[in-house]
Amino acid sequence: MQGQSRTSTKRHAPARAAARPEYTAAVRYLDGRREIFRVRNADDIADARELVLSELGDVRSVVIALRH
């Protein structure tokens, strides 16, 4: 008796959209406090900076870095 042979069909995984980069924002407030935020919905580093500044208002400094 012969065994059945299966033809291998490759299943393609659905194409994923390119992942948006994540950024880390280090913020120092006017009163000296500091916080670190994760920025996920930014198109680029300049957009990440604007998002942080629009959410927080007046701050002493903001440092944005690409998160790996």
Image (tube, helix red, strand yellow):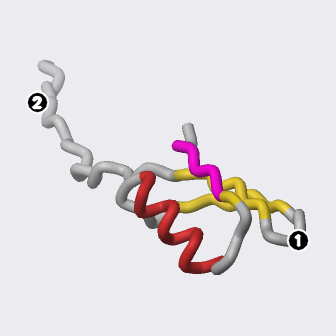
Tell me what residue is drawn at x 51 percent, y 71 percent: 51
The quarter of the picture where residue 20 lies is bottom left
Tell me what residue is drawn at x 36 percent, y 59 percent: 43
User: Please, is residue 8 above or below residue 34 in the view?
Assistant: above
User: Please, is residue 22 above or below residue 6 in the view?
Assistant: below
Give SS at disc 2: loop
Residue 45: give x, y in percent of width and height. Answer: 44, 52
Q: Nearer the viewer, residue 44 or 13?
A: 44
Q: What separation in Å lies between label 1 and label 2 (alpha carbons)?
A: 69 Å
Q: Which residue is mark 1?
A: 31
Judge from the rendering whether residue 11 lies leftward or rightward of residue 64; answer left or right.
left
Residue 32: give x, y in percent of width and height. Answer: 88, 64
Q: Nearer the viewer, residue 17 or 46?
A: 46
Judge from the rendering whether residue 36 lies leftward or rightward of residue 38; answer left or right.
right
Which mark is in front, 1 or 2? Answer: 1
Residue 58: give x, y in percent of width and height. Answer: 68, 77
For the C terminus, the quadrant is top right
Tell me what residue is drawn at x 58 percent, y 69 percent: 52
In magenta, the rendered stretch is 62-66
For the N terminus, the quadrant is top left
Q: Main secondary structure of the magenta part?
A: strand
Judge from the rendering whether residue 20 lies leftward or rightward of residue 5; answer left or right.
right
Local crowd size for mark 2, using a 10 Å CA cut-off: few (<14), some (14–19), many (≥20): few
The quarter of the picture where residue 46 lies is bottom left
Instruction: Residue 7: give its label.
Output: 2
The quarter of the picture where residue 59 lies is bottom right
